[in-house]
Image (cartoon, rainbow, N blue to C red):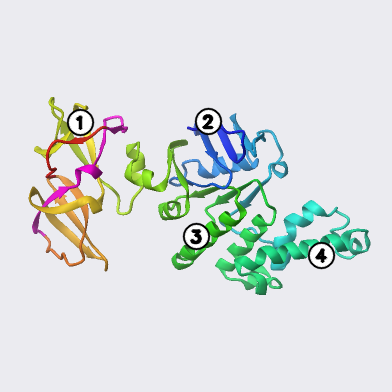
């Protein structure tokens, strides 16, 4: 989707993988610039974690290249790739303290196998100085993550959020060329996930390394990432800022995956004149397309209009700051985000219009199509 870069960061170029006759990755290309936070977003089974494993060197692709810091690491051992991973399961050593868990990458890098032996290693030249330097680095990384008072505890004595911060600290202390985060918040409760989102973004900003964050949670992607790569069925459909992904999706699959509640997708027909018909009513919109198409309208883009098209209320959900209306527009179910003061009864008829500037049109191939307003849209 994007050309690889040799100026740094993380790049994958035309990475493909087939297992048992099934295409898992279909020529995936993606670039994460130095200091950039990119969320790889998609449903379970779309190939996100497989791509992450290939970048880390845990799994090998059939074809394609992986570059980290401008260096081709496609054939490199995982330890030679200069990446740090944060997993969903934390992957902490239960018999080590917090300080020892954080220190593991530095001990492996700075000390020999003999120096790491608990009793014997202490008598070897340079061991004491190396351990003191590691202790200072651990304290430096632990402080901004709120772990300073927990350094002597073991993972079993920590909460889920504290263990996730330890996993983050262990990754940060390596000062890697790239961070790979594989759904690191999935095991946390909803309130803690919101807190950890902020902490991960703050850590990323301080460290400044290219970060690829795998998630199936669109809220995480929209609130955390500089850019989002939407992935489905082994291919990346679109890479753009959260605002563009939400408001200007290039593909029907992107539009239908992003947004909660989901976007309303309505069957429309383009007349020979280019005017769009919805449920037999002209919408005031025109397009170069001809024939059947799909009109996308976000729930917040409906508005009440006494001259609009009729829809009947099937259910209303009061959610505090807004009311979510589930309606039937002809044969199509639609959802509308309305003011909290609007409390219609089941079966009541409302007349709706929508903001034509925010409407999205997709052709029969699922690709975005041009749309223009000839007159105020009434449906």
Observer-nearest of 329 and 301: 301
Write down the residue under mark 1: 287
Give yes or no for contact between labels 4 and 2 (Cβ–Cβ under 8 Å): no
Magenta stretch in the rendered image? 347-369
Q: Mark 2, mark 3: which one is toward the viewer?
A: 2
Write down the residue under mark 2: 3
Distance from disc 4 to disc 2, alpha carbons, whole Å, reads: 44 Å
Q: Is residue 138 left or right of residue 188?
A: right
Give yes or no for contact between labels 2 and 3 (Cβ–Cβ under 8 Å): no
Give yes or no for contact between labels 1 and 2 (Cβ–Cβ under 8 Å): no
Residue at 22% from the left image edge and 53% from the top image edge = 335
- Is any atom of residue 265 visible in this view? no
Give yes or no for contact between labels 4 and 3 (Cβ–Cβ under 8 Å): no
Q: Of callouts 1 and 3, which one flags the residue occurring earlier in the amino acid sequence? A: 3
Distance from disc 2 to disc 3, alpha carbons, whole Å, reads: 29 Å
Write down the residue under mark 3: 197
Distance from disc 1 to disc 3, alpha carbons, whole Å, reads: 41 Å
Q: Quadrant of residue 276?
A: top left
SS class, disc 3 = helix
Write down the residue under mark 4: 132
Give yes or no for contact between labels 4 and 1 (Cβ–Cβ under 8 Å): no
């Amino acid at each position: 989707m994007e050309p690889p870069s040799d100026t740094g960061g993380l790049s994958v170029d035309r990475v493909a993988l087939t297992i048992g006759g099934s295409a898992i990755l279909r020529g995936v290309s993606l670039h994460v610039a130095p200091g950039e936070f990119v969320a790889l977003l998609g449903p379970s089974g779309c190939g996100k974690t497989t791509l992450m494993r290939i970048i880390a060197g845990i799994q090998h692709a059939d074809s394609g290249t992986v570059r980290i810091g401008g260096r081709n690491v496609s054939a490199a051992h995982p330890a030679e790739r200069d990446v740090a991973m944060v997993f969903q399961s934390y992957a902490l050593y239960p018999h080590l303290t917090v300080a020892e868990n954080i220190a593991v990458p530095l001990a492996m890098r700075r000390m020999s196998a003999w120096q790491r032996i608990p009793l014997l290693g202490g008598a070897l030249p340079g061991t004491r100085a190396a351990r003191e330097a590691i202790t200072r680095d651990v304290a430096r990384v632990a402080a901004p993550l709120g772990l300073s008072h927990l350094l002597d505890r073991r993972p079993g004595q920590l909460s889920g959020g504290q263990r996730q911060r330890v996993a983050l600290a262990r990754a940060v202390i390596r000062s890697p060329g790239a961070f790979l985060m594989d759904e690191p918040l999935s095991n946390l409760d909803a309130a803690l996930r919101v807190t950890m989102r902020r902490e991960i973004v703050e850590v990323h900003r301080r460290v400044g390394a290219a970060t690829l964050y795998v998630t199936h949670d669109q809220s995480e992607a929209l609130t955390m990432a500089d850019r989002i790569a939407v992935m489905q069925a082994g291919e990346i459909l679109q890479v753009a800022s959260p605002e563009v992904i939400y408001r200007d999706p290039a593909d029907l699959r992107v539009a239908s995956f992003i947004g909660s509640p989901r976007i309303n997708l309505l069957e429309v027909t383009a007349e020979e004149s280019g005017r769009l018909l919805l449920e037999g009513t002209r919408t005031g919109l025109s397009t170069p397309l001809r024939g059947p198409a799909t009109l996308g309208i976000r729930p917040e883009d409906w508005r009440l209009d006494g001259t609009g098209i009729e829809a009947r209320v099937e259910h209303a959900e009061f959610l505090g700051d807004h009311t979510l209306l589930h309606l039937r527009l002809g044969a199509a179910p639609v959802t509308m985000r309305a003011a909290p003061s609007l409390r219609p009864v089941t079966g009541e008829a409302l007349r709706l219009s929508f903001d034509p500037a925010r409407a999205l049109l997709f052709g029969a191939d699922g690709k975005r199509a041009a749309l223009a307003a000839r007159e105020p849209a009434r449906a």
